[in-house]
Amino acid sequence: MAPQYAIGIDLGTTNSLLAYIRLDAGLEAQPKCLPIEQSVATFQTEGHHQLPSFQYMPEATCPDGMYALPWDPRPAVVVGRLARELAATLPDRVAMASKSWLCFGQIDRRSPVLPLHAADDVRRLSPVDCARITLAHLAAAWQARFPEHPLGEQSVALCVPASFDPVARELTRTAAIDAGLPADAILLEEPTAAVYRWVAARGDRWREELACDDQLLVVDVGGGTTDLTLIGVTESEGVLTLDRRAVGNHLLVGGDNMDLALAHHVASAFESRGQTLDPWQSIGLWHACRNAKEQLLSGQSTGHATVALLGRGSRLIGGSLSHDLTVEQVEHVVVDGFFPRCAVTDRPARAVSSGFQELGLPYESDPAITRHLAQFVGEHAASGSVTHVLLNGGVFKSPRLQQRLLEVLAAWLPRTPQLLSGSADLDDAVALGAAYYAWSSARGGIRIRGGLSHSYYLGVEAAGMAIPGAPRPLRALCVAPHGMEEGTSEDVPGAQIGLVVGQPARFRFFASANRPQDAIGQRIDRWQPDELIESAPLELTLDGAGAGESGPDSIVPVRLHTKITELGMFELYCRSLRDDRQWKLEFNIRQPPVGQRLAP
């Protein structure tokens, strides 16, 4: 059955959303968010358009119907508002920030590791499981609202951070398919989706605000992450078009960090009065500070907000604790702490690492978003000035934070960049923009070009005599250049290389957002530590060894061929120069990585 709806899904670190629009809707129609039924208290559900991306593991002894949903009388995992609230009292039963774990290559993202400090009797989930469960909840909510239009038969765009590497993208795509999304769902980058939302809100008038050679900086600060993207305005056959030119690194700093910093400030005030918080109160304080921050930075506050906590012992006077936060205090902690004034030549501070570290996410050691932005602008906007800025994410609901960011940019640039207007739904823009993109793709509308956001490289061991105690030098071969378009394929030029088959081997891949000038087939002998970032290596044995290829020297000379699918996935083919054999190196999500031998 032909799809009837265009659907956009924002699988967020903090909140997830689903937006939709009929494919036969007129040009004036706008996508809207689906109310998602979810548990808000025991034995109570409500529909809200945001689904908090928290997963609670209920006890096996909980009564029937305690967390019932219209489509599931006894869910094994509770997702949404109640799960977020239970994180304050039962943090060892709630998986949080699973999306950030999904792109953390130093763990096996298919292994059950969340919640991190769960007891032995608590069910654990892998980051892939968490994505699948959240997406399945969205799919079920859609199915309950539109039973005659299965989600798997609609046109779907699923958003991922621009900085996700191919492994994280493939993991997300597989979780989506397992949750009931269509196999041809498009992966769309979140900052790009925010631009599509702006375009949808402006209609054809967007061409009146942007001109040829303008550069648009997208700053997306969500609950847990920050994404930076640079989009250029070009002209093709007399028509303005948009080209994505650069994306930043995946930065684990966002609104949650700001709330935690405020909580630390208030907790210090309590301790100075001899009032020590227990873990339960500390997590409650984190949530209370979020509300105070939003109130005091809204531009409509009375100048102070009271943070109150319930008491946990008879020694607490009045049974509760309270502290007055002022606008000045919040500005010092949040505005100056996370958006400090700095020079465009400043760079994020790098903390000295301890030799022993607790297993956890690689949160940024420097929380100053403006210094990370300075590095991005310095590396990618040198050839032309940033002329416009588009802000996204709930953090920028605050006019004060918008103002500070523009002040910092104005100090760096020849003229103050223009803040694009037209979309006030900062929490919902990604999902709404993705739905518009899916609708526009079917209707032949505007498309932001750009292809791959990173350049990708294959690690090739150099030939040479062995030296005791020293590995052979590793060279990086560019097999997919920055900007390579979806739906295209290309032979990798240059000398042939040897492919190890019939025995265990380690295949290493690298990515770079900082070398857009590298062409396909270019070999790099040396690079700076932060120029090439290694993805998870493949430890595997390629099958299909031919005659004389089963010993220690089972090396097949091959040529490489790169393909970028319409869904934005990267595939690398190795074609034998001896016969018609070929192999495709891929990340198999359900099992340990394998290399696939393809039929001639």
Image (cartoon, grey):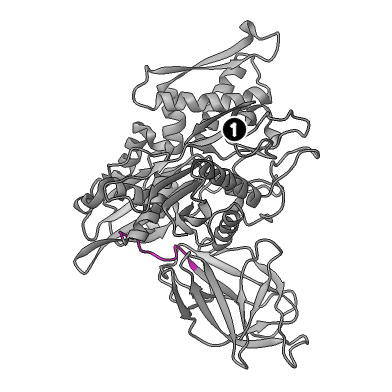
Q: Residue at x 62, y 70 (%)?
A: 508
> In the orientation shown, which residue stands out farthest toward the top?
318
Whether residue 346 is visible: no
Residue 345, relative to residue 93: is it above or below? below
Kindly state the secondary structure of the residue where label 1 is placed. Answer: helix
**Which residues, given as a range, are shown in magenta?**
445-455
> In the orientation shown, which residue stands out farthest toward the right?
120
Residue 81, position in %: x, y?
A: 57, 32
**Quarter holding residue 394:** top left
Left/right placement of residue 34 relative to residue 110 reads left
Residue 207, relative to residue 471: is it above or below? above
Residue 282, position in %: x, y?
A: 62, 25
Q: Residue at x 71, y 47 (%)?
A: 113
Q: Residue at x 39, y 27 (%)?
A: 297
Instruction: Look at mark 1 in the image and give the residue it sits on.
Output: 84
Left/right placement of residue 210 relative to residue 48 reads left
Residue 304, position in %: x, y?
A: 42, 17
**Quarter holding residue 409:** top left
Residue 189, position in %: x, y?
A: 44, 55
Total numbered labels: 1
Whether residue 175 is visible: yes
Q: Amino acid at mark 1?
A: Arg
Image quadrant for the C terminus?
A: bottom right
451 in the magenta segment:
yes
Left/right placement of residue 232 relative to residue 524 reads left
Q: Residue at x 74, y 74 (%)?
A: 469
79 in the magenta segment:
no
